[in-house]
Amino acid sequence: QEVTMKKKWGYDDVMDYAKKERDSVPSVPWIKFNQEFLDAEKDVDWADVSSASNSQLQKLLSIYGGGKAILEHVVATLRAKVGAISAIFDEEYNAAFAKFMQAYEGKKPTRDEARGLIMSSNENLIALFKQKVELETAYRYEEGRLNTFSQCYNTLSRIVSLRTDKNN
């Protein structure tokens, strides 16, 4: 008799899903930068970004401003998906919980015990919960990227603003 091991779902699976989810967001005009733009970003020392040339700053503002706009759309889309899957999961779980408690004979289990029994025996809820965790992770992952792009863009904007004030 051959025994097959089912791969356990874990952190790496969730992060892989988060990265794939970003690519599945429709109507996002993913920016493709030419090598000149990518080199401008690579050549800047963020510890001393204020010494970047005006040309480098223009390119960096394009990269981070465009990326920020795209990520705002991605984060909003994921937030909507998280809300939808959370509502579906909650409704499905509440219905399963009510049915389970109604059918249970003898001393009623605690809410946590009932949840464990329900979740361990309901494939649909397990799949919904997994999808909910994956979407929440994708949302947080992209929200972190959005925060990074926003901070970089804001920093670059301040430098440009200071240079403009200095030249007047």
Image (cartoon, rainbow, N blue to C red):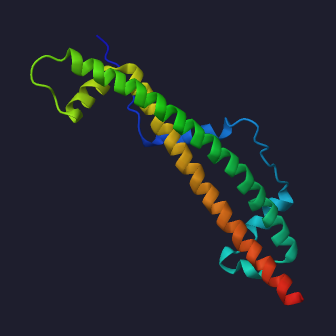
Report the residue at 79% width, 43% height from top.
29
Quadrant of the rendering where the N terminus is positioned: top left
Quadrant of the rendering where the C terminus is positioned: bottom right
Q: Residue furthest left?
A: 106
Where's residue 12, x and y in %? 47, 42
Where's residue 32, x and y in %? 81, 49
> Can residue 6 be seen at all in this image of the molecule?
no
Report the residue at 41% width, 38% height from top.
10
User: With respect to residue 43, does 37 lie above or below?
Assistant: above
Query: Horizontal placement of 10 versus 140: left or right?
Result: left
Query: Horizontal placement of 124 versus 162: left or right?
Result: left
> Can residue 136 be seen at all in this image of the molecule?
yes
Query: Horizontal placement of 159 versus 75: left or right?
Result: right
The one nearer the camera, 160 or 103, is: 103
Q: Residue furthest top?
A: 1
The image quarter in which residue 36 lies: bottom right
Where's residue 85, x and y in %? 50, 32
The one nearer the camera, 35 or 65, is: 65
Report the residue at 78% width, 56% height from top.
66
User: With respect to residue 41, does 73 lie above or below?
Assistant: above
User: With respect to residue 74, does 128 lie above or below?
Assistant: above
The number of numbered badges drawn on the structure is 0
Where's residue 153, x and y in %? 72, 66
The one nearer the camera, 93 or 131, is: 93
